[in-house]
Image (cartoon, rainbow, N blue to C red):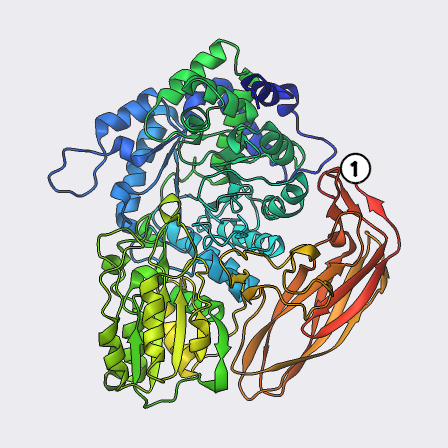
Amino acid sequence: MSRKLILFVALSGLVSTAMAQTTVAPAIPRDENIEKKVEALLEKMTLEEKIGQMTELTIDVITKRDNPTKEFQIDDALLDTVIGKYKVGSILNVPQGIAQSKEKWEEIIKKIQDKSMKTMGIPCIYGVDQIHGTTYTLGGTFFPQGINMAATFNRELVREGARISAYETKAGSIPWTYAPVLDLARDARWPRHWENYGEDCYVNAEMGREAVLGFQGGDPNNIGKQQVAACIKHYMGYGVPVSGKDRTPSSITVQDMREKHFAPFLEGIKAGALSVMVNSAMNNGLPFHANYELLTQWLKEDLNWDGMIVTDWADINNLYTRDKIVGSKKEAIKVAINAGIDMSMVPYEWSFCIYLKELVEEGEVPMSRIDDAVRRVLRMKYRLGLFDTPAYRHQDFPLFGGKEHATAALRAAEESVVLLKNTEGVLPLVSGKKILLTGPNVNSMRTLNGGWSYTWQGDRADEYATDYNTILESFTNKFGTSNIIYEPGVTYKKGGAWWEENTPEINKAVAAAANADYIVACIGENSYCETPGNLSNLFLSKNQLDLVKALATTGKPIILVLNEGRPRIINEIEPLAKAVINAMLPGNYGGDVLANLMAGDANFSGKMPYTYPKEINSLFTYDYKPCEDLEKMQGAYDYDAVMSVQWAFGYGLSYTTYAYSNLKVDKSNFTADDILTFTVDVKNTGNRIGKESVLLFSSDLIASLTPDVRRLRAFEKVELRPGEGKTVTLKVKGSDFAFVGYDGKWILEKGDFRIQTGNQTLNISCTDTKKWDTPNKE
């Protein structure tokens, strides 16, 4: 796309930018009291003050350098420059790149707020990436990563986890978290695969809504003292780069963008999300930060949403330095702001302020666009109550890091772990037997947590999480010191790249197995985050594969524990294992949970939130097209058809068994305006209490565009005692069966659909075709 065309796209429709569509109800109800305050303040502000509100700098910019104590301190002169001179309205990130105590956070933010209120009478808004609990506040409660939370298929756990994270984040006076992550994990190679709620757009939408409500509460105009502003990210299509590598181009069709990638963001906005962070990459050659259609039209106008859009790290400048769609930093600012960006995460210097002022004075950025952006920033600050309470007292949050929050995190981790294989009932482990714990992930808090844990890459978790148990420590506590043998065989290189391993000592592990009854091999990945996590292929490391192969020669039963952020290909060693557990990234309580589950003191209930590939070139999602079934060309709608996958989306075993029967629907014929109520009887036919996630899928049997083989339409989790049965009710709107046609418009076509849950199926029929003129069916 030529530069002229990009600038045309960015500038087109600017007149309509300031006017929300009146035909769509506001995504967040308008609060006239807040609007009056915003307008009164806006009228008094200088251009410099307005531009400052649109600027976000990292805390490194105001960090004192010549500090012999090494403890973080703010440089008063730099703070005066940033806030006093350039009127900067937002600071982000973690001092020295390391989690701080709630007391230190309060000290830092109070100092910034005091300066901001004294200088401008406008509070600063401070933001951090607390994406799986209170991950940048020492002593805070860590929850499992997003991919694990998806595996619970339990909305309640997601909302409660976000509520607790908000409470503990606010204990440090931080009002804004860059979460939840609503990218779709549809490419197993992607290094951010583990941050979101799996590959399915419906699961991401459901969990994203719950997270927003947990963070913000039920009234987005009045964020409580124990809540924070959510920032749903990364808008959008981030999880399917063509190369599989972070921040690289995608090639998403309009149909997939609207139908799948937009769906979680739409639900998050409807739940009242106050802010959105933009995808750092590009789609079909146009960077998202320069995409007027997606930023202004889809988000602000089509949804009548008055929240704020913030860039990701240095992404306006990347339009110039990396993406080459403009010839200067100044021109990049022009394109991005005119496209709809409200706040720039600059992050290291204040030239953004200088260039944007010049652009306004030159008429290249309309004053109406500046005012619109600043209204959105101020509105969020008023909604957060920052003008009244810029900082908080940590003493007012007595539940911080306490037992109540720990119990919630433990339960979330327990429901997130997936049992993938249990041949001959090798699990639960028989008490009193000797267990060899081996593999590089046995004695590591870093691997249990993954990235965004105390530090960006999670590389110092072992230093800061000493109060929690590694798998080794948990198993020792659970099974007794005399029953545990520890010989890792393979270890990660301390201080090296995340993927580097030391020279293996496999023979030591094999020798140790002679004295063991069971072998528990904890394998997978070390922690990483974002671009540093890029890899060349998905095979598990050769050392780890060789370790399991060598241990298999002992004849002792092997249980594989997969502790990894994305699926690593293990088809060579899976047949050698009696049992396989996908722990993913369960957080600080992951070791305790694994010990409880493998001892039989708790039951597995997690289900796969993504498709686990079997072959290096067989990277599928569950909602594939019929022609993608490489192993079975006939029977594309036969649910017994087998893709070349290791484990399917939605798969997960338990220590008990469940029987499905009597699937019914209240309307076998329906239209777009109907709500269909499905019921199915689920019975625990085993001898242990358990929780079953009931997943309801649909298949459009004939459509004008080749339909996906199946789509998840509803889910509920039910707890059943041995022998107990319950009727599970699942509601689906008729309009949910619509798809986006070749013309980019939603359509529900007359015809038949197959519904499936468990082993039960039935057919329903749409009696009338409906096509929507609106972009979002509402």
Q: Relative to 471, is 193 on the left or the right?
A: right
The quarter in which the C terminus is drawn is top right
Foreground residue among 380 and 35: 380
Q: In the picture shown, does residue 286 fall above or below 714?
A: above
Judged from this view, the residue extending furthest toward the top is 362
Residue 75 in picture, x, y percent from top left: 22, 31
Where does label 1 land, which residue? 773
Question: Please, what is the three-letter code of the amino acid marked with disc 1?
Answer: Asp
User: Residue 404: in sight, yes or no?
Assistant: no
The quarter in which the N terminus is drawn is top right
Residue 51 in picture, x, y percent from top left: 44, 22
Q: Quadrant of residue 449?
A: bottom left
- Element type where label 1 sits in the image: loop
Q: Relative to 615, is 523 on the left or the right?
A: left
Q: Residue at 76% across / 50% down in the picture?
A: 738
Q: Residue at 70% across / 62% down in the picture?
A: 633
